[in-house]
């Protein structure tokens, strides 16, 4: 466990809790994602820009690969809004999302207001792992 300026390095702890090797770039990206304890919804490009603005030397390809590793380890979930844009969520609990068309932002939607009466049966030999709900919003 690393200590930075007297506070726990949440990024390194987050990685070690999932059994991921804490490379310098992984720790830097993890710190941007969870360092303040807040949940995030962001694209790879947004994380890349944050890293570069913070002086971190990292390629966009490394950001994509790191986000994929974080998702594979169960640290994050990928939210696909349409076929061409993915957001990454540090909150891995099942919950719905709002997609704001004007700002292209993703935020959590209140789960206590979502009711799904019935899901279809999963095909034989499979199980339902997750139900992703993205509610698209347009301001009027």
Image (spheres, rainbow, N blue to C red):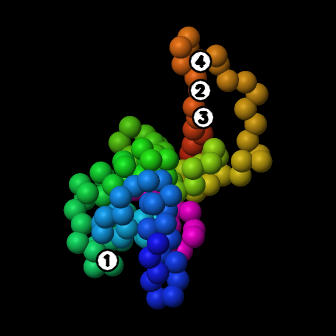
Nearer-N-terminus badge (2/4)? 4
Kindly indicate whether the residue at mark 2 contacts the one at mark 3 (C-beta within 8 angstroms): yes
Q: State how far apart marks 2 and 4 are (Cα).
A: 6 Å
Residue identified by numbered label 3: 131
Q: Secondary structure at mark 1?
A: helix
Q: Is residue 135 above or below residue 35?
A: above
Q: Earlier in the sequence, mark 4 or mark 1?
A: 1
Specify which label sits upstream in the sequence, 3 or 4.
4
Mark 3–mark 4 CB contact (< 8 Å): no
Percent of width and height locating residue 32: 43, 70
Location of mark 4 (residue): 122
User: Which image quadrant is residue 36 in?
Assistant: bottom right
Mark 3–mark 2 distance (CA, rounded to whole Å)? 8 Å
Q: Earlier in the sequence, mark 2 or mark 1?
A: 1
Magenta segment main secondary structure: loop
Q: In the rendering, at what x and y percent does residue 19 appear?
A: 44, 53
- Identify the residue position indicated by label 1 in the image: 53
Q: Is residue 109 magenta?
A: no
Q: Position of residue 67 (x, y in %)?
A: 37, 53
Q: Which residue ends up furthest to the top in the rendered image?
A: 124
- What residue sits right under mark 2 in the picture? 128
| CB contact under 8 Å: marks 2 and 4 | yes
| On-image quarter of the C terminus | bottom right
Q: From what the image shows, is residue 80 above or below residue 60?
A: above
Residue range in magenta is 34-44
**Crowding at label 3, few (<14), some or many (≥20) Cα neighbours within 10 Å?**
few
Q: CA distance from mark 3 to mark 4?
A: 12 Å
Asked if residue 53 can be seen in this view, the reply is yes
Vertical arrangement, residue 114 with respect to residue 16, above or below: above
């Amino acid at each position: 466990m690393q200590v930075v300026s007297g506070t726990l390095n949440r990024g390194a702890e987050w990685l070690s809790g999932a059994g991921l090797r804490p490379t310098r770039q992984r720790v830097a990206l993890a710190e941007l994602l969870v360092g303040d304890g807040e949940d995030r919804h962001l694209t790879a490009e947004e994380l890349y820009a944050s890293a570069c603005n913070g002086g971190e030397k990292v390629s966009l390809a490394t950001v994509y690969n790191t986000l994929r590793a974080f998702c594979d380890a169960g640290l994050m979930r990928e939210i696909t809004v349409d076929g061409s844009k993915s957001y990454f969520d540090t909150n891995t609990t099942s919950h719905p999302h709002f997609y704001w068309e004007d700002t292209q932002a993703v935020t959590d939607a209140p789960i206590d207001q979502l009711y799904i009466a019935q899901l279809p049966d999963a095909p034989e030999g499979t199980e339902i792992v997750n139900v992703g709900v993205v509610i698209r919003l347009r301001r009027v």
